[in-house]
Image (cartoon, grey):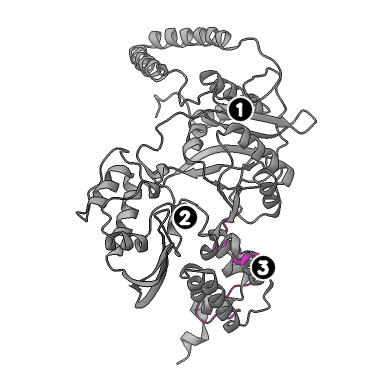
């Protein structure tokens, strides 16, 4: 310990000194970072705006990799604003997507000082400027009135879907305690285990009536919004499944097939591993489906496809149009996820179709989904890396710098020589980096006059959408016994357990 040369107090003092020097320079540092990234690759897009008093208000950015990814996977976007920053009470707003492996990817990010319709419209308009191609087919958000209005303004042709997780997580808070404990599973079945709109409406009304909640205002409002969040209603709009991030894999590795069928082998070579496993599961389940001819005319053939699931017989309707050689199913899995369903696969097996028709294979799920050029609104190609040799240069210089540091550490004199040399080199490199610039911020330009930092607030940043059970109880001010549900005691003193 005596040879370390400093104590814990010295570290604290150094940290305070560094923080003092950086205080009121956060916007300057962020702007310089954005400009440096843009200098490396001109496809890096950013925009910074003030509040009219020369103080930072909001910013938006998207790098070349994200912009290029939108060109391939921009059909579905998730917008989340449930995160706040510590110091300035800014809302962090990432826009996410799903790649061909089913993994979550970042498309763009923003910091917003206000969650108003005007702020959201500004962000969405910047998003449209930055991203190649048109509007997304679907955007998924939490329930926010200002955001809903902004989406209708900025993305008029996009289907706005409400996040089902945010809605279902509110049932325990919005419903009476006894009603939630007794009827939550029935609500779940109505939401998740219904194949069509009429079936959902019937099951929902039954459970609401049984629970005595027909006049419950929140449940009534959720039922009125059912087209925006209930799977039976929203399934017709493509949403790519929106599964959470999964482990990365080799994009061109061929997955092993459980079924030795030509179509299964075909899809193993085309799909990524994650998507192939989903397809193969549908193919396996198709072997347990039974087709029954319902109607047939000169234009189309309609089949009832039945299967046994959870001791129940479930029936889907498959329509085959003769002229276009196209099949569709009432389960709408292909429209929602982009992978053909077991019911249509059962029809293919009946008609001895050994290979998947090309029109049922979405490019976004292929291993080669990112092959091709992506251009911005001006027709200029967006590249992940403007200088292909940049990574090689960085690797070479990193190895050289590591060797130099190791040699310098052999003696005190060597450390001093290297330290002085690096300081001098840093000054020279800064002079090379800082060139002539103008005062505009964003797009393809840079600036030298920086805005002021936002005003600091005395609060800790946190996800406002996540509240622990203990915090909920403290907010309510009432504790319930987990055994009997009554108040005034806990499980240890519960009369129901202590009664002889």
Asked if residue 484 is among those painted magenta in the image, a careful observer would answer: yes
Mark closest to the chain's N terminus, 1 or 3: 1
The residues tagged by marks 1 and 2 sit, at their Cα atoms, a distance apart of: 41 Å
The residues tagged by marks 1 and 3 sit, at their Cα atoms, a distance apart of: 42 Å
Q: Residue 163 vs residue 154: left or right?
A: left
**Mark count:** 3
Asked if residue 346 is among those painted magenta in the image, a careful observer would answer: no
Q: Are marks 3 and 2 in contact (CB under 8 Å)?
A: no
Q: Residue 238 vs residue 377: left or right?
A: left
338 vs 296: above or below: above
The residues tagged by marks 3 and 2 sit, at their Cα atoms, a distance apart of: 27 Å
| Furthest-front residue in this view | 298
Q: Are marks 1 and 2 in contact (CB under 8 Å)?
A: no
Mark closest to the chain's N terminus, 1 or 2: 1
Asked which quadrant contains residue 118, the reply is top right
Place of residue 355 in the rendered image (x, y in percent of width and height, measured from the top left): 28, 50
Which circle marks residue 303 in the picture? none
Q: Would you say residue 279 is visible in this rendering?
A: yes
Instruction: Look at the image and give the residue range highlighted in magenta.
Output: 465-490
Image quadrant in which the C terminus is located: bottom left
**Local crowd at mark 1 within 10 Å, few (<14), some, or many (≥20)?**
few
Which circle marks residue 221 in the picture? 3
Image quadrant in which the N terminus is located: top left
Please report the residue visible at 40 percent of the width from the left and 47 percent of the height from the top: 359
In this view, the mark in front (3 or 2): 2
* Closer to us: 317 or 249: 317
* Closer to us: 225 or 413: 225
371 vs 270: above or below: above
Q: Which residue is mark 2?
A: 335
**SS at circle 1:** helix
| Furthest-bottom residue in this view | 500
Q: Would you say residue 490 is visible in this rendering?
A: no
């Amino acid at each position: 310990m005596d040879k370390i040369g400093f104590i814990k107090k010295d570290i604290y003092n150094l940290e305070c000194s560094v923080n003092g020097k950086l205080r009121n320079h956060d916007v300057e540092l962020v702007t310089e970072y954005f400009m440096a990234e843009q200098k490396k690759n001109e496809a890096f897009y950013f925009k910074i705006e003030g509040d009219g008093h020369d103080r930072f208000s909001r910013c938006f950015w998207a790098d070349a990799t994200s912009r290029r990814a939108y060109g391939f996977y921009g059909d579905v976007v998730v917008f989340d604003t449930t995160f706040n920053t510590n110091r300035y009470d800014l809302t962090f707003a990432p826009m996410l997507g799903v790649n061909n492996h089913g993994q979550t990817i970042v498309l763009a990010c923003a910091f917003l000082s206000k969650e108003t319709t005007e702020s959201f419209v500004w962000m969405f308009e910047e998003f449209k400027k930055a991203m190649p191609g048109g509007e997304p087919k679907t955007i998924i958000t939490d329930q926010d009135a200002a955001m809903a209005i902004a989406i209708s303004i900025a993305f008029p042709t996009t289907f706005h879907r409400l996040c089902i997780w945010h809605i279902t997580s509110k049932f325990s808070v919005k419903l009476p305690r006894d009603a939630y404990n007794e009827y939550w599973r029935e609500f779940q079945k109505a939401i998740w285990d219904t194949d069509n709109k009429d079936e959902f409406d019937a099951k929902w009304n039954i459970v609401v009536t049984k629970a005595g909640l027909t006049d419950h205002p929140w449940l009534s409002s959720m039922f009125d919004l059912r087209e925006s969040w209930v799977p039976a209603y929203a399934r017709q709009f493509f949403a790519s499944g929106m599964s959470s991030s999964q482990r990365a894999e080799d994009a061109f590795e061929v997955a092993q097939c459980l079924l030795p069928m030509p179509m299964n082998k075909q899809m193993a070579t085309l799909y990524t591993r994650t998507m192939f496993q989903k397809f193969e599961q549908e193919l396996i389940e198709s072997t347990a489906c039974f087709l029954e001819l319902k109607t047939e005319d000169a234009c189309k053939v309609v089949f009832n496809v039945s299967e046994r699931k959870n001791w129940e017989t479930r029936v889907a309707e498959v329509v085959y149009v003769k002229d276009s050689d196209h099949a569709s199913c009432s389960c709408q899995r292909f429209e929602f996820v982009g992978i053909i369903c077991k019911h249509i696969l059962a029809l293919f097996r009946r008609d001895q179709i050994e290979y998947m028709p090309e029109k049922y294979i979405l490019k976004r799920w292929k291993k080669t989904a990112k092959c091709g050029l992506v251009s911005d609104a001006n027709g200029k190609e967006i590249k992940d890396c403007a200088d292909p040799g940049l990574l090689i240069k960085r690797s070479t210089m990193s190895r050289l710098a590591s060797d130099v540091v190791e040699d310098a550490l052999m003696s005190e004199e060597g450390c001093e020589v290297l330290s002085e040399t690096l300081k001098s080199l840093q000054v020279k490199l800064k002079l090379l980096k800082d060139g002539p610039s103008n005062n505009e911020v964003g797009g393809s330009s840079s600036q030298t006059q920086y805005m002021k930092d936002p005003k600091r607030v005395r609060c800790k940043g946190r996800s406002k959408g996540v509240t622990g059970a203990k915090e909920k109880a403290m907010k309510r001010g009432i504790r319930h016994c987990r055994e009997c549900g009554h108040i005034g005691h806990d499980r240890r003193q519960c009369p129901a357990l202590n009664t002889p």
